[in-house]
Amino acid sequence: MSKDPVSRASAGTTPSPRGPERVLALWCPDWPVVAWGVPPEVPSVVLSANRVVAANPASRRDGVVIGLRRREAQARCPEVRLLDRDQAREA
């Protein structure tokens, strides 16, 4: 592909006067818990189909990991707060 701006424009990429367009992707593995607004010091997990899909650092310190069943998460961390998955809240 040519580096000529006219050739790039015809290929569907219009040059910007500010420079090339950039995209940033950010992944926050704890986001489902964060979206609930639970304080970070409160052990919390988000469940879907009775499985842990997200766990905050406070619960992970007690051995809670993604994929555990609800009862196993409670056995490892009795004070864990159980939150139902809410994809609308996470959006």
Image (spheres, grey):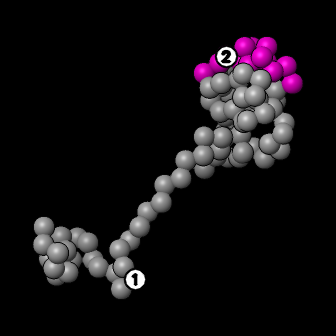
Q: What segment carries the magenta color?
A: 67-79
Query: Horizontal placement of 30 versus 8: left or right?
Result: right
Q: In which quarter of the image is the N terminus?
A: bottom left
Type of the residue with mark 1: Arg
Pick the front one: 54 or 49: 54
Q: Does the magenta stretch include residue 69?
A: yes
Q: Residue at point 60% right, 21% down? A: 67
Asked if residue 65 shows in the view, the reply is yes
Type of the residue with mark 2: Arg
Q: Does the magenta stretch include residue 34?
A: no
| Residue furthest out toward the right | 79
Answer with the quarter of the image where residue 8 lies.
bottom left
Q: How many marks?
A: 2
According to the image, label 2 marks what residue? 69
Looking at the image, residue 3 lies above or below residue 37: below
> Horizontal and vertical percent for residue 34?
72, 45
Instruction: Give the secondary structure at mark 1.
Output: loop
- Which mark identifies residue 18? 1
Q: How far apart are marks 1 and 2 (CA)?
A: 50 Å
